[in-house]
């Protein structure tokens, strides 16, 4: 039996991939899940289940009993909420609770999952870990939440917390049960729900490569350092051009300007405030789409030995999983 490792967020997309990667290499994996969580991603695995919440310091202390390493992957991953500050509070205070519990329990090493959302993108060039946002330049509550939580971990690492930070770009692949915003793009494109596109771009990476990067960060990462775990920079038009043929559809050929979409975003948000359901389109999403979210993983490649498979394989795996899971009919 390998080391005892705790993974938060293992019922989610990236967390489940990290937990599986640890289990495959022989570690003794304990996963923290809430009582209300969808447990599809942990069912049928050999994980030890610890029921609790990252915001509950008592349950975090209990979950870390006997644990050598902690992967804090859990996050409130919403791009919209009636109260945007709720997202910020959840991710900041949840991270604080996990880090303090790990310090109090003498955990040997922590890998904290941040996000490229905390980095400042360019209008076309790939940026690295040095391109840092501030609370005044970051767009949207989710990005702000990841930025302030990352800064907290950096400060605590400077005070002796043995934490390494990783920043996944845009993971895609199997077990995206929610699905994530990018997963929704894949499903919509594959089902004919995207007749047009805007000019934007993403850095696409297979979720299992991101998970492998987490393990490399545990083994080789420098305390207090941040490592982008990305793949390839891909324009949205190019991405749709791969997704649609896999589903037997013609890629959209109409490029939309952003300005006429703002009234639709305002209307979608107004309806969402009444229904409580996440809007189809948000103002923050439109504002973010002005940037090409392109990133360099050179630091992780050089220091950790990180690699990523071709992005087209990640798209293909995602389409197959969404079809088998009934999202694409």
Image (tube, rainbow, N blue to C red):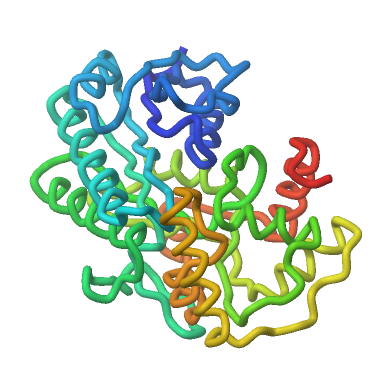
Coordinates of residue 310 in the picture (x, y in percent): 69, 59
- Residue projecting furthest to the left: 159
Task: Name above or below for residue 260 compared with residue 142.
Answer: below
| Front-lying residue, 261 or 47 | 261
| Front-lying residue, 238 or 77 | 77
Coordinates of residue 72 in the picture (x, y in percent): 34, 37
Question: Residue at point 30% right, 53% down?
Answer: 83
| Front-lying residue, 207 or 215 | 207
Question: Residue at point 77% right, 52% down?
Answer: 316
- Residue projecting furthest to the front: 274
| Front-lying residue, 245 or 252 | 252
Task: Name above or below for residue 140 compared with residue 327.
Answer: below
Quarter residue 175 falls in: top right
Quadrant of image for the C terminus = top right
Task: Name above or below for residue 123 compared with residue 234.
Answer: below
Question: Residue at point 79% right, 44% down?
Answer: 320
Quarter residue 40 falls in: top right
Quarter residue 42 falls in: top right
327 with respect to 36 (left or right): right
């Amino acid at each position: 039996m390998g080391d005892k490792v705790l993974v938060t967020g293992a019922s989610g997309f990236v967390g489940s991939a990290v937990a599986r990667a640890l289990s495959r290499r022989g570690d003794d994996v304990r996963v923290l899940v809430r009582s209300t969580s969808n447990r599809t991603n942990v069912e049928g695995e050999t994980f030890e289940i610890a029921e609790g919440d990252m915001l509950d310091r008592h349950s975090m202390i209990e979950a870390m009993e006997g644990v050598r390493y902690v992967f804090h992957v859990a996050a409130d991953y919403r791009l919209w909420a009636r109260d945007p500050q709720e997202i910020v509070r959840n991710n900041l205070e949840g991270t604080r609770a996990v880090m303090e519990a790990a310090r109090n329990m003498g955990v040997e090493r922590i890998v904290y999952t941040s996000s490229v959302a905390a980095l400042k993108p360019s209008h076309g060039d790939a940026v690295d870990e040095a391109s840092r946002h501030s609370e005044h330049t970051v767009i949207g509550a989710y990005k702000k939440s990841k930025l302030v939580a990352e800064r907290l971990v950096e400060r605590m690492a400077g005070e002796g917390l043995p934490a390494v930070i990783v920043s996944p770009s845009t993971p895609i692949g199997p077990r995206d049960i929610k699905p994530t915003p990018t997963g929704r793009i894949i499903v919509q494109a594959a089902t004919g729900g995207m007749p047009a596109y805007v000019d934007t771009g993403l850095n696409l990476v297979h979720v299992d490569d991101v998970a492998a990067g987490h393990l490399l960060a545990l083994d080789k990462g420098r305390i207090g350092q941040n490592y982008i775990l990305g793949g390839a920079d891909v324009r949205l038009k190019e991405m749709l051009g791969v997704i649609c043929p896999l589903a037997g559809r013609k890629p959209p050929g109409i490029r939309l300007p952003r300005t006429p979409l703002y009234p639709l975003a305002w209307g979608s948000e107004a309806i969402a405030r009444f229904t409580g359901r996440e809007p189809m389109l948000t103002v923050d999403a439109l504002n973010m789409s002005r940037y090409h979210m392109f990133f360099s993983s050179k630091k992780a490649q050089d220091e950790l030995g990180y690699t990523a498979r071709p992005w087209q394989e990640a798209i293909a795996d995602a389409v197959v999983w969404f079809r088998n899971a009934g999202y694409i009919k």
